[in-house]
Image (spheres, rainbow, N blue to C red):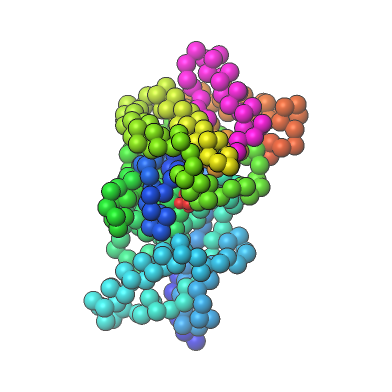
Amino acid sequence: MSDIHRASTTAPVNIAVIKYWGKRDPKLNLPTNSSLSVTLSQSDLRTHTTASCSASYSKEDSLLLNGAPQDVSGARTQACFRELRALRSQLEDSDASLPKLAALPLKIVSENNFPTAAGLASSAAGFAALVRAIANLYKLPSSPTDLSRIARQGSGSACRSLFGGYVGWEQGSASDGSDSVAFQVAPASHWPSMRAVILVVSAAKKGVSSTTGMQTTVATSTLFASRASETVPRRMQEMQNAIQNKDFETFGKVTMMDSNSFHATCLDTYPPIFYLNDVSRAAIKVVESINAAAGRIIAAYTFDAGPNAVVYYLEENEKEVAGLFKTLLGEKDGWKGERGEKIEGNFAAAEKVKEEA
Ligand code: DP6
């Protein structure tokens, strides 16, 4: 009976406040602009992944997601496997006493505690967890930055889930993608009162995948060029300053404007891409009314490639923001049937990445 080598990890979802949308190199998954996100805590939305390898396994690599077998032959997954195996091989070449794991078939088992591919950044947590689980299995000395370079090739947004707290992804300029990596803007502890309420408008799979959508946007939108070259670089700076200064007004305003800008380029895509629906727009109205009542920005919405709203707010405004949404969601009128469930995010523990290697 051959040994089974095994390691597990979890990676949380991250929700961008400056959106990644557009690839300058689809093969290496290099973006047309930098982006910035907040990583949720492990206790909220996350993927748990166990990676194992053994000579006793059938020859092919395999991946189970929430119990269902997934295709691992795609270029993205293959790129991650290849890079991680190459690093393990280097270790094995330099130390003959190490077991030869790089040559063994991999078995990956992942569980999400949230709907897959519903605009809830499932690929982000998924590839981040996959890459780190294999890196742990192979006992690689890689840093989170190194792992972010690999996870990026699985799914762009995944590179940001390798760090906790407030995380940027530098678009980079190198043609081999070596400088297109994630970096921590600030740990969650820097601004621990940040909260998010996630309104699951629809748990269904999204209509147009991010990959397809962004390729069509780059090819057809006339708004896209100025977003990538002018708007986003300016906002990246404003957002980093807002986080450093714990300035929620600016954080919130830039978050909402960037979500609107991203969805405007989707509408400007031909044929147009609609990720928001009537419930999404109702959520925007509610946020606007919360801010109008407060006389300042205390709530900020953002939407990824789907209709679900993420609303950021500070703990001190829990009642006015999450409380109001809960009251509204409890009423049948206005949110009938379609509203789904709601989940609250707590970032305070985002830092602590649970390792069970
Ligand atoms: C709207 O990371 O899913 O959520 O690199 O093609 O896998 P691929 O795309 P993906 O795109 C995420 C797009 C977004 C914005 C963001 O998270 O920055």
> Is residue 204 rendered to the left or right of residue 166?
right
Where residue 340 sits, quadrant-wise, is top right
The magenta region covers: 274-302
* Residue sitting nearer the eye, 55 or 20: 20
Residue 162 visible within the image: no
| Vertical order, 134 against 163 (above or below) | below
Residue 181 visible within the image: yes
Tell me which residue sits at (53%, 51%) in the image: 212
Q: How many marks?
A: 0
> Is residue 290 rendered to the left or right of residue 87?
right
* Residue sitting nearer the eye, 230 or 278: 230
| Vertical order, 174 against 98 (above or below) | above
Tell me which residue sits at (58%, 61%) in the image: 65
Asked if the magenta segment contains residue 282, the reply would be yes
Where residue 187 sits, quadrant-wise, is top left
| Vertical order, 260 against 103 (above or below) | above
* Farthest residue, direction bottom: 1
| Vertical order, 85 against 234 (above or below) | below
Where residue 111 sits, quadrant-wise, is bottom right
Quadrant in the picture for the C terminus: bottom left
Picture coordinates of residue 112, whole percent (x, y): 57, 54
Tell me which residue sits at (48%, 48%) in the image: 215
Picture coordinates of residue 10, whole percent (x, y): 47, 55
Tell me which residue sits at (49%, 87%) in the image: 1
* Residue sitting nearer the eye, 257 or 27: 27
Asked if the magenta segment contains residue 300, the reply would be yes
Picture coordinates of residue 152, whole percent (x, y): 40, 54
> Is residue 307 rendered to the left or right of residue 356?
right
Picture coordinates of residue 339, whole percent (x, y): 69, 36
